[in-house]
Image: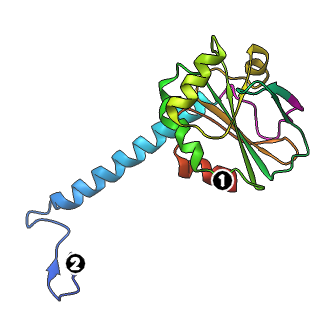
Amino acid sequence: MNNHKIRKDGASQKPFNNDGRTDPKVKTWHNRLIELLVVALVFIGLSQWLNRHLLQDGTNIPNLTLPTLSGTSSSLQWPAAHDKTLVYFFAPWCSVCRISMPGLNTLPDNQSVRVIAIALDYETREEVSRFVNEVGFKQEVLMGNSDIRNQFNITGYPSYYVLDREGKVIHQDRGMSTPPGLWLRTQI
């Protein structure tokens, strides 16, 4: 049997060396593919483990009214005026929040998506204000408390939920997320 492949330029290309062993280039390619699959499986497993305590898809969120960072109050009420609501939970001491929170500014805060950040595990309003200013977050910030943390099963930061117009959880995640990833989750 001929183990030669013909390239576009007409030359033959062997997947094996003359001694019958696999060409090192093919072996390296296969090894990289296996490494990529292992990394992907570890990432998926870790993500599932981190999210195990978050509220499940389909969970109804009750209407809420919380104080804002500026001292007024704001509500999450269902049915909402927006198609989706992204609720992002953060703590001012969270280094991952410091990196990921500015990416929320790239999401449109319009009729289709409302973006809200809820501060938890803080000591003072000034601490939250300083953090929000340092990271340059420009959207709505609400001041949460331990009851809110428990109601949403928040065990680490950042954590977030995407809710539909009726206040049902349609996606949840914990940890670093990129702006394209967050945008995609609000579109599905």
Q: Amino acid at mark 2?
A: Met
Residue identified by numbered label 1: 108
The location of residue 172, given as percent across then percent down, is 68, 38
Residue identified by numbered label 2: 1
Residue 80 visible here: yes
Please say if 101 is above or below 9. above
Q: Is residue 136 left or right of residue 66?
A: left
**Render colour scheme:** rainbow
Query: Element under label 1?
Result: loop
Q: Amino acid at mark 1?
A: Pro
Please say if 175 is above or below 147. below
Circles 1 and 2 in contact, beta carbons < 8 Å: no
Which span is picked out in magenta?
A: 52-64
The location of residue 181, given as percent across then percent down, is 56, 49
Separation of marks 1 and 2 at Cα, in angstroms = 60 Å
The location of residue 124, given as percent across then percent down, is 64, 12
| Occupied quadrant, residue 116 | top right
Please say if 36 is above or below 23. above
86 drawn magenta: no
Q: Nearer the viewer, residue 15 or 63?
A: 63
| Residue drawn at the location 22% of the way across and 54% of the way down | 28
Please say if 125 is above or below 105. above
Q: Nearer the viewer, mark 1 or mark 2?
A: 1
